[in-house]
Image (tube, rainbow, N blue to C red):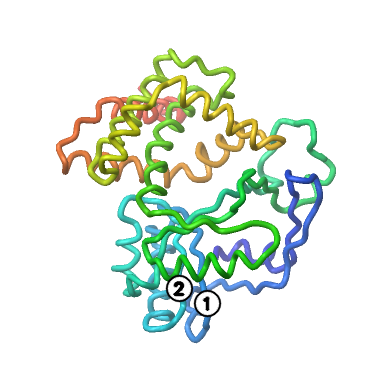
């Protein structure tokens, strides 16, 4: 954990729920600062929530090394929420944990720091209560809040069985390929959204050149061998209008959370390094497979040009 967060996280956290407009309290947990403190501990499950870029940075590598030392040859199982091409294989190699100990996963929860993101006011949001919160969250209107992949089937089964003992939500088990099928292609669309300044779906013209570029990039990614025949079939069925429609449905489902502004904060800022790292990994895979990706490369170049201009350093 980052040392500068210790003071804040050492006290109970106040959470604002967009689901019902009320405050919740999260407490009864311990805070560790140094990953070396994991030595001698015992857990049924450890959920790694660092993003893919942070996990492969120096602090993340230290965490992985210490997890390996602490949990190698133990019953502790790991759920890896970090996103990246080949990231689970990298994690297994670096940590030395057994293949049967580590599975992938994710969550449908949309969470933001309440005091570091001022979203536009929406009907149904209690601004006064939100101002009291440390974090705010919105659950996707699905029967499950957690997803675990079958990359380590027993870990997935045991975690889902444990989670399903609560009365609030369930944990779904999904094939690894199905789960990964939506990640990198979705991030290609986020790149187009960033170039369009994170518009609402209602304001997106499916014929817009930038939006079309994002759709073409999704199709290119889905041609990679890692996505198999299902990926190629999905790419053939993809349309600009269909993706706009799915974003519109997603926005409506997440109200009263303002989804475009949340994505600006999350994918345009907080998780941006992970998203870029994932796209760079995809491009490397394309080079290895001799797959042309002109649309994805054009999106990447335009985003880098925009960042250069915004920095004030452009010639």
Residue 150 percent across, percent down from the top left: 40, 60
Tell me which residue sits at (28%, 31%) in the image. 220
Q: Is residue 169 left or right of residue 187?
A: right
Q: Of residues 303 and 98, which is closer to you in this image? A: 98
Quadrant location of the N terminus in the rendered image: bottom right
Quadrant including the C terminus? top left
> Can residue 231 be seen in this snapshot?
yes
Residue sitting at the far bottom: 40
Q: Residue 304 location, x and y as percent?
A: 37, 30
Residue located beneath label 2 in the image:
77
Name the residue beneath numbered marker 1.
44
Residue under the image location 36 percent in, 45 percent down: 278
Quadrant of res 191: top left
Q: Measured from the top left, where is residue 201 in percent x and y?
A: 56, 23
Q: Secondary structure at mark 1?
A: loop
Which dot marks residue 133?
A: none
Residue sitting nearer the eye, 67 or 292? 292
Q: Secondary structure at mark 2?
A: strand
Crowd rating for badge 2 (residues with CA inside 10 Å; few <14, some 14–19, many 20+):
many
The residue sitting at 71% across, 72% down in the picture is: 28
Measure the alpha-carbon separation of dots 2 and 1.
6 Å
Q: Crowding at label 1, few (<14), some or many (≥20) Cα neighbours within 10 Å?
A: few
Residue 301 appears in the picture as rendered: no
* Image quadrant where residue 210 sits: top left
Q: How many marks?
A: 2
């Amino acid at each position: 954990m980052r040392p500068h967060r210790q003071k804040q996280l050492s006290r109970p956290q106040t959470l604002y729920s967009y689901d019902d407009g009320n405050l919740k309290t999260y407490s009864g947990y311990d805070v560790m600062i140094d990953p070396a403190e994991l030595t001698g501990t015992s857990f049924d499950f450890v959920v790694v929530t660092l993003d893919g870029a942070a996990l492969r940075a120096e602090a993340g590598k230290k965490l992985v090394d210490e997890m390996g030392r602490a949990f190698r040859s133990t019953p502790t199982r790991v759920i890896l929420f970090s996103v990246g091409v080949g990231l689970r294989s990298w994690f297994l190699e670096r940590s030395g944990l057994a293949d049967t100990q580590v599975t992938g996963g994710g969550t449908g929860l949309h969470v933001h720091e309440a005091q570091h993101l001022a979203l536009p006011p929406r009907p149904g949001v209690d601004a006064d209560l939100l101002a009291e919160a440390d974090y705010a969250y919105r659950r996707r209107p699905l029967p499950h809040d957690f997803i675990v992949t079958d990359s380590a089937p027993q870990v997935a089964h045991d975690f889902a069985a444990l989670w399903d003992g609560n009365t609030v939500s369930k944990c779904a088990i999904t094939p690894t390929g199905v789960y990964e099928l939506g990640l990198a292609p979705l991030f290609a669309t986020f790149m187009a959204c960033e170039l369009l300044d994170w518009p609402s779906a209602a304001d997106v013209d499916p014929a817009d050149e930038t939006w079309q570029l994002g759709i073409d990039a999704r199709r290119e990614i889905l041609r990679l061998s890692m996505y198999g025949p299902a990926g190629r079939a999905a790419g053939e069925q993809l349309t600009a209008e269909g993706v706009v429609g799915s974003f519109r449905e997603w926005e409506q489902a997440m109200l009263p959370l303002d989804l475009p502004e949340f994505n600006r904060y999350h994918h345009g800022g907080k998780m941006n390094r992970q998203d870029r790292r994932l796209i760079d990994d995809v491009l490397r895979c394309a080079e290895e497979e001799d797959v042309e990706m002109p649309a994805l490369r054009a999106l990447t170049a335009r985003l880098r040009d925009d960042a250069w201009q915004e920095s004030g350093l452009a010639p």
